[in-house]
Image (tube, grey):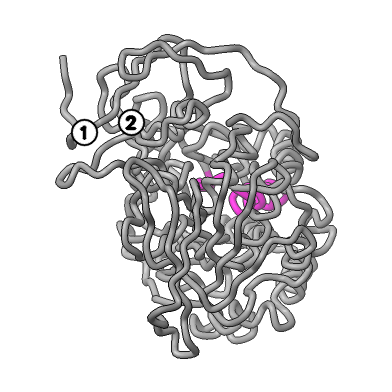
Amino acid sequence: MRIKHHPILDFPEKQKIAFYFQNKKVYGYEGDTIASALHALGVKELSLSVPLQRPRGFYCAIGNCSSCKMIVDGVPNVKTCVTPLKEGMNIRVQTDKGFLYD
Amino acid sequence: MIKTELLIIGGGPAGLAASLAAAEAGVSSIVVDRNQSFGGQLIKQTHKFFGSEKQYAKTRGINIAKKMIEDTHKYENLITLLCDTTVLGVYPDLVATCLKDDKYYKIKAQAVIVATGAYEKTLAFENNDLPGIYGAGAVQTLMNVYGIKPGNKIIMVGSGNIGLIVSYQLLQAGIKVEAVLEAAPRIGGYKVHAAKLRRYGIPIITSRTVLKAHGEKALEGITTIALNENWEMVAGSEEYYEADALCLAVGLSPLSNIFGMLNVEMKYIPELGGLVPVLRDNYMTSVENIYACGDVAGIEEASSAIVEGRLAGFYAANGLKRSLDDKEINDCKKQLQLLRCGPTGEKIRSGLEKRGEGNA
């Protein structure tokens, strides 16, 4: 899903970043946000809506609409579309309104 | 508490232009932006801009952002850029509370320019919450900032300039655009953009909209429906399209939340994108020393945002007892007039008139 050739922009290969999605080790690249890295892996479902448990993906990709919220390293409601991906991050699909765990 | 003469909220084209103009007049400013980088939505605009040289015409948006950021470095003593900083509130004594790296900061300013930009509208239809349905800006961000394809088969909704330009950018990224749907009977954007798509054989279908999205976990297709001259759905005209991404380019709304906590007088003007602040001639809102410019003051092109930002910067500097350069002001006003002239500027002119800027 990554763009290889583009008439205007260059997307040189960047350093790989390992992280965990639903406890599975996966890879993104330096410069990715959490949501962009997941999208490149084909993951579109980031959370489930609270009352009806409908799948949710991101909508605006600029940190506005809150449709991309996930649990990151145990912290819920993280806007993954604007949060840079970091090595070893533990990302989980959020299915409730979010609680602070110990 | 950090002290500054001018606080500018939002480091997009309007905010950066305002900081540069204020610096030219000798006023120091802090520009805060919640994003990782400055330039606002310019950082994903790969197309060349129209307008005149003063608004960086013929330059790609990505390069305009770079140029403006470079220009701020010329005024290192006057302009401070604070990225990754979210303004949480602005209080009547012009103290703004900001969040950066999980820490709170207070910034006390003598004047505030709000240049927060806009957010994308969406469209009401069944299953419009399915993953794979994106705003046009999101699609641009994904492709042009992160180099990731939003999907393999995409349908664009909206044939305004954003819809047309993003469709072309999708082609450049090697993505198949199945069709561009337009609810109105005519194409909304410039002919030159529409012609480019037509040359690639992409159908632009007018008087048709989305009825329903299909898919379990993510988008798999959509049902469209024709609209008659009264914008009513025509029964029996349904058509199915297979698509793994749907891009909604159906307009923007001003991101005007901050005005709410300042009791700024607002007006609902559809032509300007919705709820916008009432402005005085010098871009000051109804509240003393709070200014607004760019999309948050009314949805327009980035070129106009740059000029409005300049004007707001000059006027804010004037409010802080710096002299006003009439030549610069007149020049900016002339630029705005040019950007808003002709049939394409009709909507914005009518919107400004409703706000009480008849000669804008």
Question: Is B126 on the left or on the right of B2, as rendered?
Answer: left
Residue with the mark numbered 1: A95
Would you identify the image quadrant in which residue B100 lies? top left
Q: Is residue B191 above or below residue B87?
A: below
Which chain does the residue under circle 1 lie in? Answer: A
Give me the residue at 66% from left, 48% from top: B170
The magenta region covers B5-25
Which chain does the residue under circle 2 lie in? Answer: A
Would you identify the image quadrant in which residue B14 lies? bottom right
Residue with the mark numbered 2: A78
Question: Is B144 on the left or on the right of B136, as rendered?
Answer: right
Image coordinates of residue B320 in percent, x first then y, are: 56, 55
Give me the residue at 52% from left, 29% from top: A40
Determine contact: label 2, label 1, CB under 8 Å.
no
Tell me which amino acid carries mark 2: Val
Residue A50: in sight, yes or no?
Answer: yes
Badge 1: residue crowd in 10 Å (few <14, some 14–19, many ≥20): many
Q: Nearer the viewer, residue B110 or A17?
A: A17
